[in-house]
Image (cartoon, rainbow, N blue to C red):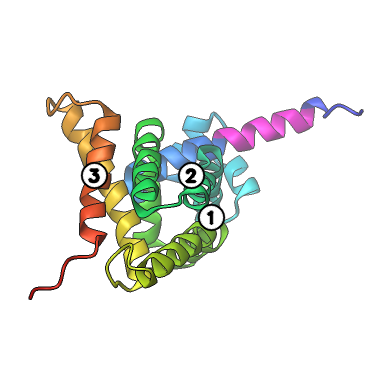
Amino acid sequence: MMQPSKAMRSATDARTRILVAAAAAFAANGFRAASIRNIAIAANVREITVYRYFPRKQDLCWAALDFELRCSDLAVNLSVAIQEATTPEELLRVLSGVACECVRTKPALLRLICFTLLELESESELMYQVHFRSPLSELVDHMRSWSRTGQIRAVHPEAAAVAVIGMLFAASKISNYVASHGGSCESRGDRSADVADICIAGLQSQPQPK
């Protein structure tokens, strides 16, 4: 089997360094405030090299986001959790664990996702189509099915799916921040389970008043 040449390996290494540096810069500063010059310095390449790989700043931002999402396996982990869950309680606890682990191991990823959603409409749509459309569709299907069978209250399935994902990740991020600043010393697992239980209580069918 032919081995990649030194030039090919060098090009790959340079591109990867650029993506890592860009992801860090965009997560820290947002799209508009991030500097291509500073990204090039952090990647140890010339600025012209960045533009050789990524002619537009938006191309670089999307490539960096796509790279980080693939490295994190976030969409895959969400899909696995959703596909394997058999009850609302199981699903929310597993999803809460996925969110907590993502916040712990990839603390800048949520910032990168949020800045993209706030600043880049076409890249936000691309992120949804490439990475999150499948797991969110699966989650919507679960919500619709469980709502019909009475396992959860009657809710709009798309709204419920988005609310659950948003709450779990936001709560995990805030919980991690509070714990790192002298808050509760509970384990991350305990905190993620508590967040899941709160979500479950909100979705459970309530008895009708007599």
Q: Which residue is mark 1?
A: 131
From the image, which quarter does the N terminus lie in? top right
Q: CA distance from mark 3 to mark 1?
A: 24 Å
* Label 3: which secondary element: helix
Q: Are marks 3 and 2 in contact (CB under 8 Å)?
A: no
Q: CA distance from mark 3 to mark 2?
A: 19 Å
At horizontal 40% and vertical 31% (from top left) the residue drawn is 105
Q: Residues within 10 Å of mark 3 (few under 14, many from 20)?
A: many
Q: Are marks 2 and 1 in contact (CB under 8 Å)?
A: yes
Q: Of 207 and 177, which appears nearest the observer?
A: 207
Q: Position of residue 70 (x, y in %)?
A: 56, 43
Q: Of 43 and 177, which appears nearest the observer?
A: 177
Q: Position of residue 27 (x, y in %)?
A: 37, 43
Q: Amino acid at mark 2?
A: Leu
Disc number placed over residue 195 in the picture, else none: 3
Is residue 57 in the magenta section? no
Q: Which residue is mark 2?
A: 74
Q: Of 23 and 106, which appears nearest the observer?
A: 106
Residue 9 position (above or below residue 74)? above
Stretch of the chain drawn in magenta? 7-17
Most extreme residue toward the front is 210
At horizontal 14% and vertical 73% (from top left) the residue drawn is 208
